[in-house]
Image (cartoon, rainbow, N blue to C red):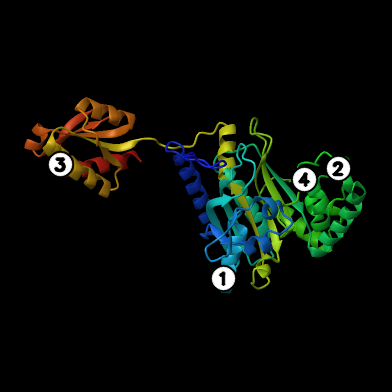
Amino acid sequence: MNMRAPRGTQDILPGTSEKWQYVEQQLIELSRRYNYKEIRTPIFEHTELFQRSVGDSTDIVQKEMYTFTDRGDRSITLRPEGTASVVRSFVQNKLFGQPNQPTKLFYIGPMFRYERPQQGRMRQFVQFGVEALGSNDPSVDAEVMALAMNAYQGLGLTSLKLVLNSLGDHESREAHKDALVRHFEPHKNELCSDCQLRLEQNPLRVLDCKKDKDHPAMESAPSILDYLNGESRKYFEDVKNHLQAMGIDYVIDANLVRGLDYYNHTAFEIMSDADGFGAITTLSGGGRYNGLVEEVGGPETSGIGFAMSLERLLMALEAEGIELPIEESLDCYVVALGEEAEQEAVRLTYNLRNAGIQADKDYQGKKMKGQFKAADRLNAKYVVVLGERELEQNAATVKNMVSGDQFELPLEEITGYVKQELDGRE
């Protein structure tokens, strides 16, 4: 029997989980500042949701989804991305009818894709993402990109590059698609089997192929920017002007396309230029989508969003040598000697915790020396010692593990004293 974690998954153990918690709290606080509210959607959805929203021609739907039939003979899929579920909830719960629009949401949670595991790319991975639904204002596009950049910069990352493109409106995209078909058709037999199919289903995705990226036809492929109509061109200029007003640098990449079928107008990725980050430099990506809300049964509503992998974010922090300010210590450790002292230690530890103090005690019957060693390993700030002599006097010895000072206090004063001292350190 194989009792190891499935390939492409990982255990996040104490010592590492604190980094995840810190990063998640920073992202939640950043979302609050931008007035985005948290949404939590099911980990699995009806398969049709992703077929209709993500697109039948995408690698996600064709190759990467974890799909199964439940006991009710329904096709169910573990969510491979977050946008479709958020939009489904937006429609189902009629969030479009709320007075404050656009509806600005964020999510953090696991996603699932069956792909070849490699550094920073797992079969179960965690995404943070935002979606702003209900506005065609290009300043919302700039706001979403600003939030994404702030997320990385707020954690100390500096080797960042915002890459920007426009996919245009429907008219512009159709004109560009026709041009791509005409351009690649003479080379069709030279392309990989996936791209031969993409050329028929979604020619834009040929530009995103990893296998054929060095084919000469890629470099000379028609640029979407040459096919933007007047409205799309103005929209793109407005987005760039808003970024410039915020002092956010960007570079234009006319070949940047998003891997999902529902994007139009703004498309962007944030990449890491850090040495040693790896061959796959993309940290996050997103863009604007129209038609997705209607596709899942809602009213005509535009949206924009992005998603970032927390695994890749932590990789980027490591590549830049950034240490997160995580304090690995314990507020107070209670040492007990004897049965009566053990009973009092249980009560005192409980009271300390109820007062908001991080407290612990021995659970292995160790001698006093062993208990002090445990306190040292836990980097305890204070140790409270309970013994027969102390109990006879209804007192305990308190030791400051930083200064080494120690003195006796009445038992009823211990909790208040430790709390006051800890609050004074903050």
Residue 162: tell me if it is visible. yes
Q: Amino acid at mark 2?
A: Glu
Residue 95 drawn at (x, y percent)? 56, 70
Q: Which residue is mark 4?
A: 209
- Relative to 173, 277 lies left or right: left
- How far is mark 4 from mark 2, CA to CA? 13 Å
Q: Amino acid at mark 3?
A: Gln
Q: Residue 314 falls in which quadrant of the image?
A: top right
**Identity of the residue drawn at 49% across and 51% down:** 29
- How far is mark 3 from mark 1, CA to CA? 54 Å
Residue 254: tell me if it is visible. no
Query: At numbered mark 2, what does the secondary structure look like: helix, strand or loop?
Result: helix
The answer to whether mark 4 and mark 1 are in CB contact below 8 A is no
Residue 420 drawn at (x, y percent)? 26, 43
- How far is mark 2 from mark 1, CA to CA? 44 Å
Q: Which mark is residue 219?
A: 2
- Going from the N terminus, do you reach mark 4 or mark 1 first? 1
Q: Which residue is mark 3?
A: 343
Q: Residue 137 falls in which quadrant of the image?
A: bottom right
Query: At numbered mark 1, what does the secondary structure look like: helix, strand or loop?
Result: helix
**Identity of the residue drawn at 19% across and 43% down:** 346
Q: Amino acid at mark 4?
A: Cys
Q: Which mark is residue 92?
A: 1
What crowding class fits label 2: few (fewer than 14 Cα within 10 Å), some (14-19), or many (20 or more)?
Answer: few
- Relative to 129, 384 lies left or right: left
What crowding class fits label 4: few (fewer than 14 Cα within 10 Å), some (14-19), or many (20 or more)?
Answer: some
Query: At numbered mark 4, what does the secondary structure look like: helix, strand or loop?
Result: loop
Q: Which mark is residue 69?
A: none
- Relative to 17, 156 lies left or right: right
What crowding class fits label 1: few (fewer than 14 Cα within 10 Å), some (14-19), or many (20 or more)?
Answer: few
Q: Residue furthest front?
A: 1
